[in-house]
Image (cartoon, rainbow, N blue to C red):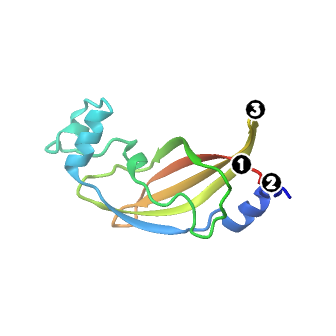
């Protein structure tokens, strides 16, 4: 007997906006410089640790990752694939800081393609500096092609 499609409204009710992970990230100057150069950044404030306004590029939080879903999130029966990243910078990230990332599922939605229904999960990590300043939101989208058994 085939299983029914996953009830997306039920998943939203049970999992959206529920913090499921808190993680610390040490922001190392050499890593932010390497990231900046790899991305093609040429500005001295991103590539020169001696610059008076030295900081990580605005997209740097996209490389900070944790779990994609809560431990008790159901198996949706398909392989998860990267469906994109997005960063909302709110304040400069200064190398040498330790940031705290707090993750929750921010959105769950579906699209139907030629191969069937796809479920998109948006995991948001809110990043805070040591003094509690909210410095960025980093969204990771995962797409799973639903497999009905």
Residue toward you, 4 or 50: 4
Work out whether 51 lies above or below 137.
above
Label 2 and label 3: CA atoms lie apart by 16 Å
Dot 1: element: loop
**Cα distance in 3D space between marks 3 and 1:** 12 Å
Q: Which residue is mark 3?
A: 114
Choose between 130 and 114: the one closer to the eye: 114
Side of 88 relative to 56 (left or right): right
Residue 101 image offset from top left, x and y in percent:
43, 62
Residue 58 position, x and y percent, is 38, 42
The answer to which of 30 and 142 lies nearer the viewer is 142
* Horizontal side, residue 96 vs residue 137: left or right: left
Say which label, 1 or 2, has the lower sequence index.
Answer: 2
Read off the residue under disc 2: 5
Q: Secondary structure at mark 3?
A: loop
Label at residue 146: 1
Residues at circles 1 and 2 in contact by the CB criterion of under 8 Å = yes
For label 3, the crowd category at 10 Å Cα-Cα, with few meaning under 14, some 14 to 19 and many 20 or more, is few
Q: Quadrant of the N terminus?
A: bottom right
- Comes first in the chain, label 2 or label 3: 2
Q: State whether residue 111 is above or below residue 107.
A: above
- Using the rendered view, name the quadrant where residue 6 is placed: bottom right
Residue 71 location, x and y as percent?
57, 69
The residue positioned 65% from the left and 50% from the top of the image is: 78
Res 115 → quadrant: top right
Q: CA distance from mark 1 to mark 2?
A: 8 Å
Quadrant where the image shows the C terminus: bottom right
Q: Is residue 62 above or below residue 15?
A: above
Give the crowd class for mark 2: few <14, some 14-19, many >=20 residues within 10 Å: few
State the SS at label 2: loop
- Residue 121 vs 20, above or below: the answer is above
């Amino acid at each position: 007997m085939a299983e029914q499609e996953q009830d997306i409204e039920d998943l939203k009710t049970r999992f959206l906006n529920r913090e499921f992970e808190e993680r610390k990230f040490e922001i190392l100057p050499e890593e932010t410089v390497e990231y900046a150069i790899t991305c093609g950044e040429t500005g001295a404030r991103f590539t020169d640790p001696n610059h008076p306004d030295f900081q990580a590029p605005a997209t740097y939080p996209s490389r900070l990752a944790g779990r994609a879903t809560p431990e008790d999130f159901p198996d949706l029966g398909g392989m998860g694939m990267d469906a994109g990243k997005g960063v909302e910078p709110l304040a400069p990230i200064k190398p040498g800081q330790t940031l705290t990332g707090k993750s929750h599922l921010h959105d769950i939605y579906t699209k139907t393609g030629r191969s069937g229904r796809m479920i998109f999960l948006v995991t948001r990590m809110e990043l805070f500096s040591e003094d509690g300043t909210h410095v960025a939101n980093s969204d990771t989208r995962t797409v799973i092609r639903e497999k009905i058994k």
